[in-house]
Image (cartoon, rainbow, N blue to C red):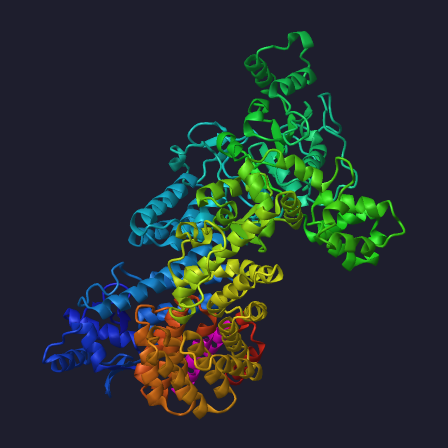
């Protein structure tokens, strides 16, 4: 017999015949037994599934009847149904239940390495998904709360499997195969953003960008209308890849084409590209007719590492000719306006291959390539170098124009550039039309039948190049700019490539060209350090290399200290002429809107590697919408880089340039911006902490606003963090900024803000599992609190620092600091003393004195109750529950754990609720109430997974493994120990990792 639960519940005989147990309640009993295969199901659990909260008086007799009928159905099969106190148990091979077989297949797929095992894993996941035989899981069972919980759990695991299968297919280049199933799943669960993001990526890989955008906007509207939220990071990232790609993620031939350039059709069967060959129409292209940008070719790659044999490494660069033509050995008779090759050019081989794929004579691309990036990245040098290599493919001419979009003088007028181009193409001066439209029409006519290469350098706006694009199908154009020029992607179907820092190997090679391989080989570490201080930008490296080349007696290490000093770095990269980093940035600054220029300066007080619109709004003292415009302008000019949707990073050289700009502004502006930014993070951290730790940390020591108006106190300026997972995701990204602000506030003497931010961030550090960073931040905050002279501030910081030290295994330090906090709060009945006593209790237990620890814990609880601080008791109650467990009093432990949970009933993912659940499960285990313990363990693990609280999740997995081993369930324990090991590895706890590895080695002998 085979039990089918993944759809309507039924039994399948060995001959494939379906046997449906009569009645919904009988099917429910079978489903529950099968899901709990090998485990005894209590009678009360059956009652809950079959009848909900109100079982009838004869429920037990009715259940016995259902069990007897099921025994008859299962007779003679490998499934054995027996009576086991306090209920019934079904035993047999896991392969006899489709839900359990599904879990095994998914687990096997999860263990397959990425990306080498994608094909094998995708097959396993497909087998698992094929086990489902209907969308309405358990729908034919009685409508009870437990039925809904079980069905929802099954749907969730299927969704996770579908997501994993789709991700594997995307990496294999087979994403379109997953699109129909993802579409059906999203229709059933329209607010599931991961499903929507995967569907967008699969449709994009299928060459259906319009359908992908439709999915995005439909999901965005649903989220806004029904949940009041915007798209999350994954969905925004997926749709962003349609509009702007990153070349490093995929082969150059398909790397960053956002849309294909409009191509001439050759009938219904296919399209004729710029090479003159007829290519079959891509699958799904019929759906593109409604797209705002017509395109015959859409991208075939997605942001997953490609492994399919269809994607080949780029061919070596070589001059190419158009189809049906013979490559000329030389430039040919056409005009050649290209600047000379750049002396000492090195690197950018990937980018030049991309240009060859987009614009070369045998290109699959559309012939219009745009290189964008910040000043000093070598955009012009890369374009010119490739153009010289590709000369033979364009025998009718190579035209070049510097449009001076970011130069010191006026921009070149497109009409004037057209005149130069027309003269180069043989039009006499007297025949040049005066009318700009007539001049452009003549240019289009002359270029239509030629094989021309046009390089348009230093462009500011897309409108400056529109009339300069040649029209011939064998022509190609390369555009360079510090602006993003996304309009060219939209209106002309351009392929876009962003140039950033050089790879480390290319940076080393450029230094070798500049100062000689021997000097670089003699000081490899100094050379690497110099390259990093130059942000691996070609312009900065060339200036540093020129200084070394002019001083042959210098070692590379002699220049490094000048670059390492942030006060002299930009000066060290200044040639006192036009070729300097500062000059290049000055030219970009001239074209920024005023708010963006001001933000560039104010970001100098931001200590983190990334910022967002909310922090920018605090700095600018404006709304988030205005801040987004300013950030967008900085990103469009490549002074910032959007590292993730809504988050922006910057090069160190740009940061130092911003600091110079801020130094030119009044000191009061720096002070106001610094205070506003710190207050913003104080407010956001305080509100975020309340989700994880409702209670004492949020009742005392609220900072008075230091600036007016206090932008940090305006909820409209805060990021939207409605859940614990969203909060921890935000904090993982914001943590370096928080730690930097704590340090910066202390260094400038703002000790009150320093300690308060450290104090409020503590539970976020705990939840995120950042133990080392947590201690670093707390030590700075503790020193700052001491400088305020406020005993309550010092005691608060001593208590939380002691708790962090205890969690890191430094029990002696924790005990000393906790004792100080308790002594400092003698006679106090406030929250600080409750917390100090609780921390001291934990440290005392770690010192081997559980009885005394329990006494201290009960003191903390009594103090909270006596002074009306019951809302601050969860930490003390949960902690004391654990202490009773250590003291061998599981009954009292269970009582205190449930007291803590009752106080936090409205906060199921709060850290002290989760810790209380761990203590409750452990107490039930000690009381030998294994069924109840199993249920609490499962709930705890699931909640920890949902919340993303790494440390508590690790602790729960570790202790659940002990529970499983005690019950003789070694295979499950091994899987759980592996999970615990991974989590402790993320925490950096090498001691526990080693302990778990030893245990696993004993359980898994080679």
Between 480 and 634, the residue placed more toward the observer is 634
In the image, residue 843 above or below residue 668: below
Left or right side of 958 for 47:
left
Residue positioned 71% across, 42% down in the render = 581
Residue positioned 40% across, 65% down in the render = 690
Left or right side of 350 for 211:
left
Magenta residues? Answer: 954-983
- Residue 311 location in percent, x, y? 56, 48
What secondary structure do most residues of the magenta stretch adopt?
helix
In the image, residue 668 above or below residue 845: above
Q: The N terminus is located in which quarter?
A: bottom left
Residue 455 included in the magenta stretch of the image: no
Residue positioned 18% across, 80% down in the render = 67
- The quarter holding residue 126 reads bottom left
Q: The C terminus is located in which quarter?
A: bottom right
Between 523 and 285, the residue placed more toward the observer is 523
Is residue 289 at all visible to an observer of this figure? yes
- The quarter holding residue 159 reads bottom left
Between 176 and 675, the residue placed more toward the observer is 675
- The quarter holding residue 90 reads bottom left
Left or right side of 411 for 261:
left
Left or right side of 432 for 84:
left
Residue positioned 14% across, 70% down in the render = 23
């Amino acid at each position: 017999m085979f039990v089918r639960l993944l759809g309507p519940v039924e039994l399948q005989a060995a001959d494939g015949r379906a046997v449906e147990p009569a009645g919904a309640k009988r099917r429910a009993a079978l489903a529950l037994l099968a899901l709990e295969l090998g485990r005894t199901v209590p009678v009360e659990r059956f009652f809950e599934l079959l009848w909900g909260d109100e079982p009838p008086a004869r429920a037990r007799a009715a259940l016995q009847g259902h069990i007897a009928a099921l025994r008859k159905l299962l007779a003679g099969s490998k499934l054995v149904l027996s009576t086991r106190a306090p209920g019934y148990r079904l035993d047999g091979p896991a392969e006899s239940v489709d839900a359990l077989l599904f879990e095994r297949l998914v687990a096997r797929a999860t263990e397959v390495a990425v990306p080498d095992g994608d094909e094998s894993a995708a097959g396993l996941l497909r087998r698992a998904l094929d086990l489902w035989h209907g969308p309405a899981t358990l729908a034919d069972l009685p409508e009870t709360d437990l039925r809904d919980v079980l069905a929802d759990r099954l749907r969730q695991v299927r969704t996770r499997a579908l997501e994993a299968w789709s991700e594997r297919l995307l990496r294999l280049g087979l994403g379109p195969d997953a699109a129909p199933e993802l579409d059906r799943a999203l229709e059933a669960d329209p607010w599931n953003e991961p499903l929507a993001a995967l569907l967008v990526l699969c449709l994009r890989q299928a060459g259906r960008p319009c359908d992908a955008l439709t999915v995005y906007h439909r999901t965005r509207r649903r989220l806004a209308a029904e949940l009041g939220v915007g798209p999350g990071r994954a969905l925004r990232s997926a749709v962003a890849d349609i509009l702007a790609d990153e070349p490093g993620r995929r082969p150059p031939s398909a790397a960053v084409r956002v849309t294909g350039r409009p191509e001439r059709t050759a009938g219904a069967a296919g399209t004729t590209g710029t090479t003159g060959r007829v290519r079959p129409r891509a699958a799904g292209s019929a759906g593109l007719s409604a797209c705002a940008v017509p395109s015959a070719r859409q991208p075939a790659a997605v942001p997953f590492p490609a492994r399919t044999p269809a994607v080949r490494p780029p061919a070596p660069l070589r001059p190419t000719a158009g189809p049906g033509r013979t490559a000329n050995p030389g430039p040919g008779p056409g005009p050649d306006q290209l600047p000379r090759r750049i002396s000492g050019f090195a690197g950018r081989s990937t980018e030049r291959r991309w240009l060859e794929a987009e614009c070369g004579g045998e290109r699959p691309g559309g012939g219009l390539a745009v290189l964008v990036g910040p000043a000093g990245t070598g955009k012009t040098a890369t374009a010119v170098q490739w153009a010289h290599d590709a000369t033979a493919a364009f025998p009718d001419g190579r035209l070049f124009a510097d449009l001076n979009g970011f130069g010191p003088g006026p921009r070149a007028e497109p009409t004037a550039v057209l005149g130069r181009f027309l003269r180069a193409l043989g039009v006499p001066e007297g025949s040049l039309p005066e009318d700009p439209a007539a001049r452009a029409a003549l240019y289009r006519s002359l270029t239509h039948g030629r094989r021309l290469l046009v390089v348009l350098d230093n462009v500011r706006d897309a409108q400056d190049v529109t009339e300069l694009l040649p029209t011939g199908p064998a022509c190609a154009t390369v555009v360079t700019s510090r602006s993003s020029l996304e309009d060219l992607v939209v209106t002309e179907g351009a392929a876009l490539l962003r140039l950033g820092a050089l790879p480390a190997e290319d940076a080393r090679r450029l230094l070798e060209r500049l100062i000689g391989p021997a000097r670089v080989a003699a000081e490899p570490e100094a050379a690497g350090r110099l390259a990093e201080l130059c942000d691996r930008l070609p312009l900065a490296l060339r200036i540093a290399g020129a200084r070394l080349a002019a001083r042959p007696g210098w070692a590379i290490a002699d220049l490094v200290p000048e670059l390492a000093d942030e006060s002299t770095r930009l000066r060290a990269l200044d040639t006192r002429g036009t070729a300097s980093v500062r000059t290049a940035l000055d030219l970009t600054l001239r074209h920024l809107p005023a708010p963006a220029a001001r933000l560039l300066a104010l970001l100098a007080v931001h200590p983190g590697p990334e910022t967002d619109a909310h922090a920018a709004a605090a700095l600018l003292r404006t709304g988030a919408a205005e801040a987004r415009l300013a950030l967008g302008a900085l990103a469009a000019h490549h002074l910032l880089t959007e590292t993730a949707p809504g988050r922006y990073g910057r090069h160190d050289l740009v940061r130092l340039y911003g600091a110079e700009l801020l130094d030119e502004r009044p000191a009061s502006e720096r002070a106001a911006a610094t205070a506003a930014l710190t207050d913003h993070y104080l407010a956001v951290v305080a509100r975020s902490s309340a989700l994880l730790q409702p209670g004492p940390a949020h009742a005392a020591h609220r900072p008075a606003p230091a600036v007016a108006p206090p932008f940090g106190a305006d909820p409209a300026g805060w990021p939207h963090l409605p859940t614990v997972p969203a909060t921890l995701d935000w904090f993982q990204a914001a943590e370096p900024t928080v730690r930097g602000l704590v340090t910066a506030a202390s260094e400038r003497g703002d000790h009150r803000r320093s300690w308060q931010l450290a104090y409020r961030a503590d539970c976020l550090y705990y939840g995120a599992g950042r133990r080392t960073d947590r201690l670093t931040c707390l030590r700075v905050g503790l020193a700052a609190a001491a400088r305020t002279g406020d005993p309550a501030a010092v005691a608060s910081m001593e208590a939380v620092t002691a708790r962090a030290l205890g969690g890191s295994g430094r029990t002696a330090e924790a005990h000393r600091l906790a004792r100080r906090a308790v002594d400092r709060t003698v006679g106090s009945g406030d929250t600080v003393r409750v917390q100090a006593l609780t921390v001291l209790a934990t440290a005392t237990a770690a010192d081997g004195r559980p009885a005394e620890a329990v006494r201290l814990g009960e003191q903390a609880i009594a103090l909270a109750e006596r002074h009306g601080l019951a809302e601050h008791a969860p930490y003390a109650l949960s902690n004391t529950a654990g202490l009773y467990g250590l003291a061998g009093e599981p009954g009292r432990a269970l009582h205190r754990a449930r007291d803590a949970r009752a106080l936090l009933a409205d906060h199921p993912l709060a850290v002290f609720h989760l810790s209380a659940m761990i203590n409750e499960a452990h107490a039930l285990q000690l009381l030998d109430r294994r069924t109840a313990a199993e249920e609490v363990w499962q709930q705890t693990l699931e909640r920890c997974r949902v919340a993303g609280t790494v440390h508590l999740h690790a602790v729960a997995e570790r202790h659940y493994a002990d529970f499983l081993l005690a019950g003789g369930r070694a295979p499950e324990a091994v899987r759980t120990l592996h999970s615990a090991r991974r989590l402790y590895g993320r925490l950096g706890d090498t001691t526990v990792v080693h302990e778990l590895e030893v245990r696993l080695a004993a359980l898994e002998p080679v």
